Amino acid sequence: MKNKYIIPFSLIITILFFACEKDLPTHLTFDAYEFASIDSEGGSWKPVLISTGNAISLAAPASVNSSEYLQEIEDVKAERAKMTNADIQTVIYWSHNPIIRWNEIALELTAKYNLIPGPNPDGTYTLPNPANPAGPPPFPFANPPYAVRVFAYLSVAQFDGLISAWHYKFNYNRAAPYVYDSNIQPIYSANNIPAYPSDGAVIATVSRRILTQMFPLEADYLAKKEAEHLRCLLLSGTNVQSDIDAGKTIGAAISTIALSRAADDGMRNAQAPKAVSDSMAAAAKQRFGWEWVNMEIPKRPVGLAPLYGRVKTWNVKNVEDTRPGPPPAIGSPEFEADVAILKEYARNVTAERRRIANFWQDGLGTYTPPGHWNQFAKELIVKYRFNPLRSARTFAYLNMSMMDGGISCWDTKYYYNYPRPIQAIKGFKTILGTPNFPAYTSGHSVFSAAGAEIIAYIFPSEAARARQWAEEAALSRLYGGIHWTFDATVGTKQGRDVAQYTIDAARKDGAD
C-alpha cells in the first residue's frame, strides 16, 4: 500500500471519494487549504477519555514581549535560515493538518503487519506475543479486529488531546510567531488559530506513543517520524519551542490515559485458547444443532479472536443488546433458497462482480475493511476543509463506531458459530479464500455499515453514496462466495444499529 495518490486538489474535490481503483492508496496529495472553520469553542466540546478540556493542567505561556519569547522567535528564524529544499518538501508533507499523515502511518503499519502467522515445521502454531514482539511470529497480526482497535485508540486520543489544546489556545490566545515577526513567512495558510499549545505537537506525541504500543517493532521508525514532525512545526513558522513543549505535555498525558484503558479492555484475552474456543462451539451446537468447522488450508487450531466479542466497547453499553436473532436452520427452506442464490453467483462470476469482490476484499497485506473507511474519511476531510480538531473528531467517532461494530459482530459470530457456505454446500468454491471464523454475521458488512453511518452523519451530502458503498461491500462477500446473503443483510442492519449509539454520543458533544 505504498503507491501515491497523485491528484491535484482541484480534481480531488470532484472525484476523490469514489475513485474505483482495486487497491485504495494510503497517501493523499493535497494543497494547504484555509479551514472551513476554526471552531474557537472547541475547547468546550465533550471529550471521550477525560472529563473536560481543562482536565490536563497547562501553565500560561510567557508574554510575547518577554525576553524568553523573543529569543524563541530568533531561534525559529535561525532554524529556518538553514532550511534546504528537502526540508521545505518535508514541511509541506506534514501540512497544517497532520491528523491525515498520522492516520496514513497507522494504515501503512496495519497493512505491513496484516499477515497470518504461519505454521511451525511440526504443524503447530505459535501466536504473536507482545512480550516477545520480534517473534517468530512477529507481533502483532493486524487482522480487522486488531486494526480497528488501533485506529480507535489513536483517533480518540488525538481528539481528546486536541480538545484540551483548543481549550488553552483560546484561553491564552498566543498567536503564531509569524504574527509577531514579519520576517517569518509561514509555509502554511494562515488560519488564525492560536499557537500555544501546538496542536501539531499534541498529535505527534499522542500518535507516536499510541502506535508504538500497538506496533512495538516500529518504535525507532515512529520516533523518527515524531522528531521529523516536531521539527517541521518550527520550520513552518507555526510554532516556537514552548508551543511545542506544551503540546507534548498534553500529548503525553492523554496518551497515558488512553493506553491505560487499552491495557484493561480485554483485548489480551481475545485470542482464546483452544479449550475455550471448543467450549463456545459446543454451547452453540447444543443451542442450535450446527457447528462451524474451519476449512482453511493449512488449518489453524483456533478461530480468529473468539473472545473479541467481550472486549470493552466505547458507546454500546451491553453488546448482547446488539446481537441479532439466529440465522436460518440448516436445511430449512430459507437456507436452501440461499444455497441457490450463492450457487447462481458462483456460476456467473461476471467481470463486475469480480471487480466488486476484489475492490472490497481488504484481505492480507491491506489496511483491512476499517482502514478502507478511514481512507474515505480522510479524503472527505480534505474536501470539506476540516481543521485538525474537527478531523480528529471525524476519525474518533468513525473508529469507535466500527470497533463497537466489530465487537458486536464477533459476539454474534461465536455465539451462533454458524458454518460458512464452503462447509455447508458440497463442492462449493470461493474466489476470496476461507476466513477462519464463523459466518454469521459478516464482518465486512458490519464494519462498513457502521462506518457509512458515521460518514453520513458528519458529511450529510455524502450520505446516500456512503450507504450505497456499504451495501456494495456487503454484496462483495456474496460475490466472493464466503458469506450467506443473511450474513450480509443482517450484518448491515447490525452495523447501522451499533453506529446509532456513537451518533447519539456525538450529538451531545457540543460540536454540532
Image: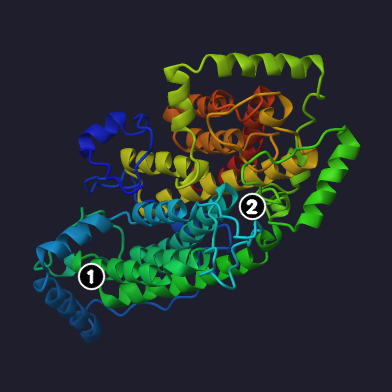
- Give the left or right position of residue 120, taking residue 9 as reference: right
Q: Secondary structure at mark 2?
A: loop
| Crowd tier of the residue under label 2, counting other residues whose Cα lies within 10 Å: few below 14, some 14–19, many 20 or above | some
**Residue depicted at 48% across the width and 39% down the height:** 362
* Image position of 454 (left or right of 9): right
Residue 12 sits in quarter: top left
Identify the mark at residue 409; answer none if there is no mark.
none
**Left of 76 or right of it: where is 283?**
right
Instruction: Please state which amino acid type lies under the numbered disc 1.
Output: Leu
Residue 13 picture location, percent across and down = 28, 33
What residue lies at 69% left-to-right and 55% top-to-bottom?
311
Position of residue 219 relative to residue 429, above or below, is below
Residue pushed farthest right?
286
* Nearer the observer, 160 or 507: 160
Q: Which residue is mark 1?
A: 234
> Pointer 2: what residue?
314
